[in-house]
Amino acid sequence: MMPDKSKTLFIGPFAPPYNGDGIKNNFLKEGFLAHGFHNFIWFDTICRKGFKLVLLFKLFWAILKARQVILSINVKGRFAIIPFFWLVKSVFNKKGVLYVIGGLFNQQLENLFKIERFFFVKFFNSLDGIFVESDSLKESLEQLGVKNVWVIYNPRKDSGHRWSLSDLNRKKAVFVSRVTRTKGVSVLIETIISLAKSSGHKINLDIYGPVDDAYAAEFYQLIDKSEGLCVYKGIIEPQTVQSVLTQYHFLALPTFHTGEGLPGILVEAGLAGIPIIITRFNALGEYFKNEESSILVEPENVDSLSSGVEKLIESDLLADKISKGILNTTQPYRLESVMDQSIGLLKSFNWVLS
């Protein structure tokens, strides 16, 4: 079987649904096409109809036919597909890179049995490059023996909408993410209720995102408990997120989700320049600095979050400082910057892109 050297296979989930994995891959697809690379095969790993086994067979067949493979997949995909790719690569001359989705790739490797980890490190090292979203993740993977690791940030497209504080958005907070306990929704709602009772700060919170079924009952009870301070607003269309963010005083994401990497919503907040309140959790403190490009608070802590909110809403100077800081911080995450770096690395690996 002679693969077409001008064809590149891109494997990963695409939106919808509008979660981090699919949105990231939609942007990457847009970026490659914008650079004139139309000789790509886009393989969506989401089974939208039919049987998953048939989709898996089609995926393996596509890998066999491809000369160059871009894998932009989460943990399940990594540990299922990459061993197969390594086996194929050992027989046929193929090239491959991995965009890592999810922030705990190093821990996932560490949690394997020693012999399993040995083989998976070998599998990953057969790739031309592994693209991760933080310096700490790169260092951790290298300590485990993974080679050819490069930091490439989570891409987002800048719509040009910019935040400014006014009477129209003052004391209006927004949450945008998957609506579940580990994203800090319960802590955030309790904080809004607590501030209204204890300090007289009446803050209105709008919540956007898909609600997890297992969390729905608790969530809607908390919404009722807030007596109108907190409102669920549904799901924002991806192309309007940045403009919607500018309608608020700040974005809050007090996450303690174990798989948290760099949430795309924080990049979009940065491109808009809206101040953010986030937790010191995983690598978030690496990306954003306290009182420079964010307000950092402790996870699962209403008192800490309340203090952070009060500090921000009581100082317009601080809000303006954080707005400028986050705008500067997120410039490398612009789609154009990410694509220039990605394409430059692929060409350095002697990939044929057309």
Image: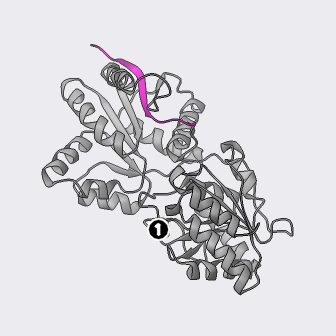
User: Height in image: 162 above or below 70?
Assistant: below
Q: Nearer the viewer, residue 146 or 202?
A: 202
User: Height in image: 50 above or below 178?
Assistant: above
Residue located at (40% from left, 61% from top): 135
Residue located at (78% from left, 59% from top): 247
Whether residue 331 appears in this view of the structure is no
User: Height in image: 296 above or below 237?
Assistant: below
* 170 relative position to 113: left or right: right
Q: Nearer the viewer, residue 271 or 200?
A: 200
Whether residue 75 appears in this view of the structure is yes
Q: Which residue reaches farthest top? A: 1
Estimate the x, y position of residue 269 in percent, counting from the top left. 65, 58
Q: Nearer the viewer, residue 176 or 232?
A: 232
Residue located at (37% from left, 30% from top): 69
Q: Does the magenta stretch include residue 257?
A: no
- Of helix, strand and loop, which one carries label 1? helix
* 61 relative position to 264: left or right: left
Q: Nearer the viewer, residue 244 or 148?
A: 244
Q: Which residue reaches farthest right? A: 167
Residue located at (25% from left, 25% from top): 93
The colour scheme of the drawn protein is one colour
Estimate the x, y position of residue 234 in percent, counting from the top left. 69, 49
Q: Give the amino acid type for the residue marked by disc 1 in the picture.
A: Glu
Estimate the x, y position of residue 86 in percent, counting from the top left. 23, 34
Q: Does the magenta stretch include residue 5?
A: yes
Q: Which residue reaches farthest bottom? A: 198
> What stretch of residues is rendered in magenta?
1-16
The residue labelled by disc 1 is 286
Q: In which quarter of the image is the N terminus?
A: top left
* 130 relative position to 155: left or right: left
| Label 1 Cα neighbours within 10 Å, binned few <14 / some 14-19 / many ≥20 | few
Estimate the x, y position of residue 144 in percent, counting from the top left. 23, 57
